[in-house]
Image (spheres, grey):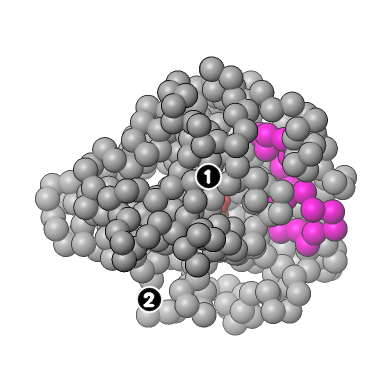
Amino acid sequence: MNHQNEIMIKEDTTDENGLNTMSDQENNKKGLGEKWPEPTVRVQSLAESNLATVPDRYIKPPSERPDQTIIINHQPQTAAINIPVVDLNSLFSGNEDERERMSEACREFGFFQVINHGVRPELMEAAREAWRSFFNLPVEAKEVYSNSPSTYEGYGSRLGVEKGAILDWNDYYFLHYLPLVLKDLNKWPSIPSNIREVLDEYGEELVKLGERLTRVLSSNLGLKEEQLKEAFGGEDVGACMRVNYYPKCPRPELALGLSPHSDPGGLTILLPDDKVVGLQVRYGDTWITVNSHPHAFIVNLGDQIQILSNSIYKSSEHRVIVNSQKERVSLAFFYNPKSDIPIQPLQQLVTSTNPPLYPPMSFDEYRLFIRTQGPRGKSYVESHISPLDN
Ligand code: OGA
Ligand code: NI
C-alpha cells in the first residue's frame, strides 16, 4: 500500500491489509452502528400479507410520487428518447460511431446500455435466476444473512439510518467482490446450491467488463487508456453488488421501489429484470423508463466519475417504480475506486478556465452520505462542489 497517496485522508480506517478497522464506537459516532434505528420490516412480508394499501412509512409525499399514467398502463413509457445502445464488440473493433455514441451518452445522460459485451448470456441468466430463487425463499431462511448499517453486507431492507425516514419498497442483498480481503463467501447466500459458484464467475466477468469500460471512458476523455483505472487504485479497485428485490406493491402510485439517487461510486453495471420494467432515468424534468435490449447491461456513471472528470461526465439520477402485478429482480454491480485513496478531478481535465470543482475525498468518506441519509437525488455530489471555487 502506498501511504504517500493517503496523506490527504482525514482518518485512515484500514490496516495494511486493507481491512476495515473502524471500531464500532467510531461507526456509532457516524450513525453506522450494528443496529438499524427501527426494527427491520421485510417488504416481502408486507407484500405477502395482502394489504389493501401500503403502510404510511412507504408513502411518498405527493410531489415525489411517480407519474400515474406510467403505473396505470403497466407499460413502458412510449417516449421518443430511450437510452443509447452501444455495441462493445464493434467499438473495440474500431467502429468510431459506437465510440461516439457512448461518448455522447456519457455527456448527456450518464447512462447507456451495452450489447456484445463479452459476458455469456447463460451466465447472466443463471445469476438472475439464482437470485430469484433466493428471494423466493421464505423470509425466515434469509434472516440469517440480515445486515447491519456498519457494513451493509447481507440481506437488508433500507438505505440510511435516519429514524422515521420514509422507506422504499424493496429488499436487497449486498456483497463484496473486491478487495479480496472483503470477499467472504460465508456472507453470501448458500441456497440455491449453485449460487456461490455462479456469483463468483459473474463477479469475475463483471470486473473484466468494468475494466474494459473504464478504458473506453478514459480514451473518450482524451486520457491514456489506463488512467481512470489508475485513479481508481490500479489493481486495488473495489467491486461489490447490490441485488434488488421489488415485491408487488398494492399501491404503486404512492410508493417508489428506490428513491431518486445517483450511485456514489465509479461505474454501475446493471442486469435488469428481463420481464419487468421499473428503472427510470431523469432527463431534465422527465423520467424516462428504461426498456433494455435483450442480453444488455445498463451502464451508468457514478459520482466518482463525475468528480474525476471534473464534471465533463455526469453521474445519472435514477429511480425505480414498482407495480401491483409483478415482482422485479435486478443485479447492480458496482465497479469502484479503492475506498481509502483521495479522489479528485484529474489534473489533465483541469485548466485555468476549468478549475477543479471538487476537493479530494476518499470513497469511504463519500459513501457515508448515502449510507447515513439514504437516497437523496444528486444532492451529495452537488453539495461536494469545492467552496474555494465559488
Ligand atoms: C441501484 C439501482 C436500479 C434497478 O441499485 O443503485 O439504481 O433497476 N438499481 O434496480
Ligand atoms: Ni442506482
The residue carrying mark 2 is 81
The segment highlighted magenta reads 149-169
Above or below, comparing residue 147 to residue 235 in the picture: below
Magenta region includes residue 369: no
**Residue at the limit of the structure toward the right, as seen here:** 39
The residue carrying mark 1 is 361
Disc 1 on helix, strand or loop?
Answer: strand
Q: What's the magenta bit mostly, secondary-structure-wise?
A: loop
Position in image of residue 7 (x %, y %) = 50, 32
Viewer-proximal residue, 344 or 317?
A: 344
Question: Distance of mark 1 from mark 2, alpha carbons?
Answer: 35 Å
Name the residue located 81 percent from the left edge and 42 percent from the top edge: 36
Disc 2 on helix, strand or loop?
Answer: loop
Name the residue located 55 percent from the left edge and 31 percent from the top edge: 176
Ligand number 1: quarter of image: bottom right
Position in image of residue 235 (x %, y %) = 37, 27
